Image (cartoon, rainbow, N blue to C red):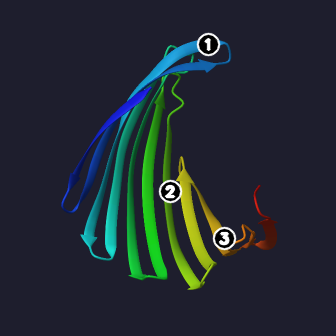
Amino acid sequence: MSGYAAHRFPVGTSRLELTASRLERDAESGHGYGFIWDEEWNVANDLSLSTTLSHTTESGLSNDADISTVALLLRHDLDSRFYWNGDISYSVTNTDVNDNRENAFTSQAEFWNFLPDWNASLRATHDMVDNAQRSNNPLLVLHQHDNYGFSWSVIAQGKAQLAGNGPRP
């Protein structure tokens, strides 16, 4: 169950969501509750900044946890066909059995709509979990979608993959 309140300002929107849930894991029952505070701000006509702050508490299970996250996303529209974004997030999970974890994630991506119904994107990511770092190879996606419901994508990250689908009934 969740509920939220939002307020629109001349330069953006702020939203606060409260959550409560029943948890079931390995024949155990517990509950969780938390909040999510999102804000999106139009810094300039072509630049937006989004922030998220969240906290969740899970209890009643053999491994109770507190999870806190902070995230930041910056998006810049260079023109109607090209934009880039960058994001960073950091989360901490504390449990009652001393299994505490930290995770940091960053990414940067470019998106280009180079022809009608055609777009390409390039994304690079880096994450760190408990000081173990991992950088992913850049991900290149070429996508085409037509007015008849056909679409296909070519995805390249170390090796290329082709995926597609036809019209949906």
Relative horizontal placement of residue 113, taking residue 162 as reference (left or right): left
Q: Amino acid at mark 1?
A: Glu
Q: Amino acid at mark 3?
A: Asn
Q: Earlier in the sequence, mark 3 or mark 2?
A: 2
Q: Which residue is mark 2?
A: 105
Q: Which residue is mark 1?
A: 28
Relative horizontal placement of residue 103, taking residue 36 as reference (left or right): right
Counting from the top left corner in percent of width and height, residue 21 is at 48, 23
Q: Which residue is mark 3?
A: 137
Instruction: Looking at the picture, tell me which residue is in the foreground, 135 or 47.
Output: 47
Residue at horizontal 55%, vertical 81%?
112
Distance in Å between CA atoms under marks 1 and 3: 40 Å
Q: Amino acid at mark 2?
A: Phe
Which residue is most to the left?
Answer: 10
Residue at horizontal 56%, vertical 65%?
125
Classify mark 2: helix, strand or loop.
strand
Distance in Å between CA atoms under marks 3 and 2: 14 Å
Q: Where, by quadrant of the figure, is residue 66 drawn?
A: top left
Look at the image and tell me in which quarter the C terminus lies: bottom right
